[in-house]
Amino acid sequence: MAILHPFKAWRPTPDTVEEIACVPYDVISVKEARTLAEGKPKSFLHVIRPEIDLPEGTDPHDDRVYEKGAENLKKFLSDGTLQQEDQRHVYVYQLIRKGRPQTGIFSCVSVDDYDKDVILKHELTRPEKEDDRTRHLLTQQAHAEPVMFTYKDDEQTEKLIEETMEEEPLFNFKAEDGVVHKLWKASNTDAFVKAFESIPNLYIADGHHRCKSASRAAAEEKKKNPEHTGNEEYNFFPAVLFPMSNMNIMAYNRVVHDIPDGFLETLHEKFKLTPGAAPSPSQKGNISIYIDGKWYAMTLPISDNPNSVEQLDVHRLQEHLLSSLLDISDPRRDENLSFVGGIRGTEELEKLVNNGDADMAISMYPTSIEELVEVSDEGMLMPPKSTWFEPKLRSGLLVHTF
């Protein structure tokens, strides 16, 4: 069973939430964060991107960055910017992008569930990113941002969500990107907890490093606590849990910065490209390639009887094109390959090639949520940058301290 852990959240007031709430730390650069937070002393970017309050060029792993983040959070907790609930609660969180609602449950989940694979993964984590997030957690003594999870649709939880949404929301605002954010406090918290006792697994959608860092931080806190019971707040971390049917995955596209002379001819010979293709492929198994100002359609080869990973378009691309033809064997670290989230559109791919930043762009068909769950259920791992989830959760709505 999955453990749902209600928590005493720190949150903005309804009249300040728009000023405080911000995009997640990992979707913007430091430069973009500085711009977004300019003139906004209460923006939560000062907590999750504290390097913006230090001189430009400061190493993001400098001790001062972690200390500044803790200082900024402490200030927000003490000066009333964030106020703590009197009781533990579960919340319902809805995001509406271009008229499409995505509604889930905002609560804490268990580190033990993560460690014991009740919470299932589909990506590897990188030690340097784990180290960074773990230091932020331990220095701030808080989980400042939630993780995005999914779970298989369940009638009971859906009913509870609908009942909660009949009440007036705590928050209802439109962010600068046009996404509407609504948050309700559930009055039937115990019913939500009980319902999740029949949910066998949770699946990480977005936030593998935050999950791993929560586990590492809990282990460090446990070492310092001779009376550890497992019920301490450091054993739980915040997440928004969406039923599978609510999830929206966009393509995660690729650009290759340098290709060999005559590479287009090589692709024609090996894969029989079709010129005049649409920038976005219309079905699984197809990609669109942009070279020299033109789009070409290509069908990805597939092995006989593929397993859940081998049938993924991102795996087929990696195996049959990037690795075999361009010697890009480690897509996580190869500097000849960059990734472009689908939210930026195919116009961004064209721009990168047309201005000389890349020689070739590859437009992908989105990985499905069913594929993600199948890979996770089989205990396998996806290639890096297989999914781009949209809309993104807003940071600063609910903060969990431990």
Image (cartoon, rainbow, N blue to C red):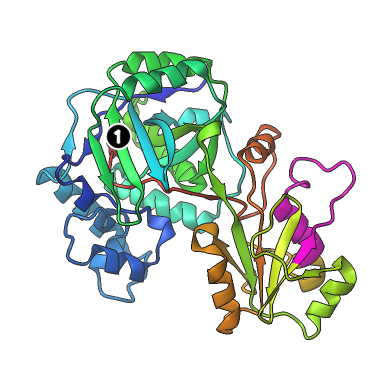
* Residue at the outermost left position: 79
Going 58% across and 64% down the picture, which residue do you hit?
339
| 13 in magenta | no
- Residue 230 in sight in this render: no
Q: Quadrant of residue 95?
A: top left
Q: Quadrant of residue 378?
A: top right
User: Foreground residue, 273 or 70?
Assistant: 273
Q: Which residue is mark 1?
A: 183
Left or right: 31 in relation to 254: left
User: Foreground residue, 52 or 178?
Assistant: 178
Looking at the image, how many numbered discs can be counted on the residues? 1
Left or right: 185 in relation to 253: left
Helix, strand or loop under label 1: strand
Residue 320's spot in the image, x, y percent?
81, 61
Going 34% across and 14% down the picture, which residue do you hit?
190
Give the crowd class for mark 1: few <14, some 14-19, many >=20 residues within 10 Å.
many
Going 43% across and 58% down the picture, which residue do you hit?
27
The stretch of residues the image draws in magenta is 297-321
Going 64% across and 65% down the picture, which residue do you hit?
279
Left or right: 344 in relation to 168: right
Q: Is residue 373 above or below residue 349?
A: above
Residue 88's spot in the image, x, y percent?
26, 23
Q: Quadrant of the C terminus?
A: top left
The amino acid sitting under disc 1 is: Leu
Residue 313's spot in the image, x, y percent?
72, 52
- Residue 13 in sight in this render: yes
Q: Is residue 332 above or below residue 24?
A: below
Q: Is residue 53 above or below residue 242?
A: below
Residue 32's spot in the image, x, y percent?
35, 68
